[in-house]
Image (cartoon, rainbow, N blue to C red):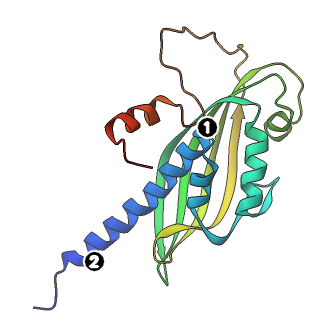
Amino acid sequence: MQGDPMAGCIEEIRDRMAIQDVILKYARAIDRKDWSAVRAAFHEGATDDHGEYRGGIDGMIEWIARRHAAIHQSMHFIGNLLVEWLPGRRALVETYYQAHFTLDGDAREARALWLDGQAGGGANLIVLGRYIDVFAARPDWRVAERTNVYESVLAPQQPPSGRNPANHWSTRDRHDMYFKIRRDLLPDAP
């Protein structure tokens, strides 16, 4: 018998799940403004092309952090994730996303990027797009090259809603309810 025929399938499933995990952790990191976790999604020397920003990952993080300073809420939804295997433990990965944002009134940089600089107060936006990534296993799967492709930007014409203080509201930092519950369950975790 020439080895286990399932071994290759199991390895492929493991690799797909590792890639998906990187994408999901990246989305959460952006929403929580956890810039070190954003950095962890990329290999050293990785590049990013967001159109308006093209360059290394440290510069990308500075660019995103500056833009997100005036974004009150951010929530990324990850959809279709297609993996095509490339030679040399690499993969071409196309990931669909929806990013829902609540802009503060002074969100000039975000307005310039998504609304062609239109002036105004606070706004809700839905940005639809795709990440076109080249992942590499060195040895862990991470992004080596990213190109962000925008599909469309929707700007519903209603002001951001008020907040009932009795509810649990998302925060964009380590004070978010997820981290509180995680600290309660895993007090020794970093």
Q: Is residue 23 visible?
A: yes
Q: Splitting the image into 4 quarters, where does residue 118 fall?
A: top right
Image spot of residue 178 (x, y percent): 44, 34
The residue under label 2 is which amino acid type? Gly
Residue under label 1: 99
User: SS at mark 1?
Assistant: strand
Residue under label 2: 8
Viewer-nearest residue: 27 or 130: 27
The residue lying at 59 percent from left, 11 percent from top is: 163
Q: Is residue 1 above or below residue 69?
A: below
Q: Splitting the image into 4 quarters, where does residue 146 fall?
A: bottom right
Q: Is residue 65 above or below residue 75?
A: below
Image spot of residue 46 (x, y percent): 66, 69
The residue lying at 39 percent from left, 38 percent from top is: 182
Image spot of residue 121 (x, y percent): 83, 18
User: SS at mark 2?
Assistant: helix
**Residue at the far front in the pictured view:** 188
Q: Is residue 115 visible?
A: no
Q: Earlier in the sequence, mark 1 or mark 2?
A: 2
